[in-house]
Image (tube, rainbow, N blue to C red):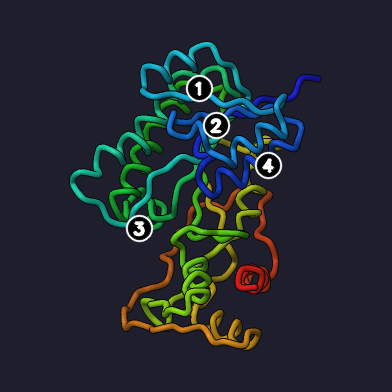
Amino acid sequence: MKNKTILLTGTTGFIGFKFLSFIISKNFFVIDILRDKNKNNKKLKKLKNLYPKKYKNIFFSNNNELLKKLKNINVDYFINFATLYNNDHSHHQIKDFVNSNILFPTIIYDIISNKTKKMINFGSMMQHSKDKDLVSKNFYAATKNAFEMISNYYAKKNKKTKFYNIKFYESVGDNDKRKKIIPTIINNYKKNTTTNILSKKLALNIIHTDDIINSIMILLNNDIKSGSYCIKNKYNIKISSLINNLNKKINKKIKVKYGNKSNVSNFHSNLKILPKWKPIKNLEKKITKIFINEIN
């Protein structure tokens, strides 16, 4: 039986590359869409050399070239990891946000949505600053919400294709170099510098990157109803408690300075949890292991 084909975007990002590294060893043929500037990406080249018959790159320099290269392509599944994120924005960044978070995935949807079985888009719970409603926390979330509304149009137009929007709050993984709170604490610890944290009361809902990969496999292998779903832990992790527990296991203490900001925990939403999905157990233990491995 022919292997199913998966089309990916965002494989140069942390989560996208994690999924690419996982799925390429399974029974799938993988194609990723990359801008020309990524032709010399060492990590992707290494995977291409390891799996030359299972992995293909599509490079493009502009949207017209992207249209031509995707016109005759047939894929079973499309997963959009591509995103441009910043908590704030300046005027000159607006075009980049729109191009990355709206225009780029919309072009792909428009070309392949009527000949693809399932399309999975990853967003953020920042899109839901007021419960289930699409109320944006920042401009980044606004562009993700705009694309979700566009994807709803394609879902209505193409009844045979399943469309999914998956959101989560925070994530962490092995060898994580992103400007997220856990890798920031690790990086500052290694540099012997202080980490500034908004409040001693800060509590965040964090999932592991394995949880994200698991959510994708559930969607690929099960007949789940189209829609928007959340993947989240059953509890928030209080960052000051996590640091205190880490300090018990290391010789040199973590340098931290707490601010006095109020209302610092993840906001809550009643967005439905993805069916059949559960977070990994003992996440704090997993984070501790990541921390110890990184500093040694």
Residue in the image at 48% along x and 74% along y:
191
Distance between mark 3 and mark 2 Cα atoms: 26 Å
Q: Is residue 107 left or right of residue 6?
A: left
Q: Is residue 50 left or right of residue 135?
A: right
Cα gap from disc 4 to disc 3, whole angstroms: 29 Å
Secondary element type, mark 3:
loop
| Amino acid identity at mark 3 | Lys
- The disc labelled 4 sits on which kind of residue? Met
Which residue is outermost to the left? 91
Q: Is residue 202 above or below residue 58?
A: below
Q: Secondary structure at mark 4?
A: helix
Earlier-in-chain disc, 4 versus 3 = 3
**Res 113 label:** 1
Q: Nearer the viewer, residue 84 or 189?
A: 189
Residue at image location 67% in from the left, 57% down from the top: 278
- Give the x, y percent position of residue 40: 52, 34
Marking on residue 119: 2
Q: Quadrant of residue 157?
A: top left
Callout 1 touching callout 2 (CB < 8 Å):
yes
Where residue 130 is drawn, which disc sits there? 3
Whether residues under marks 1 and 4 lie with C-beta atoms below 8 angstroms apart, the answer is no
> What amino acid is found at the position of numbered circle 2 in the picture?
Met
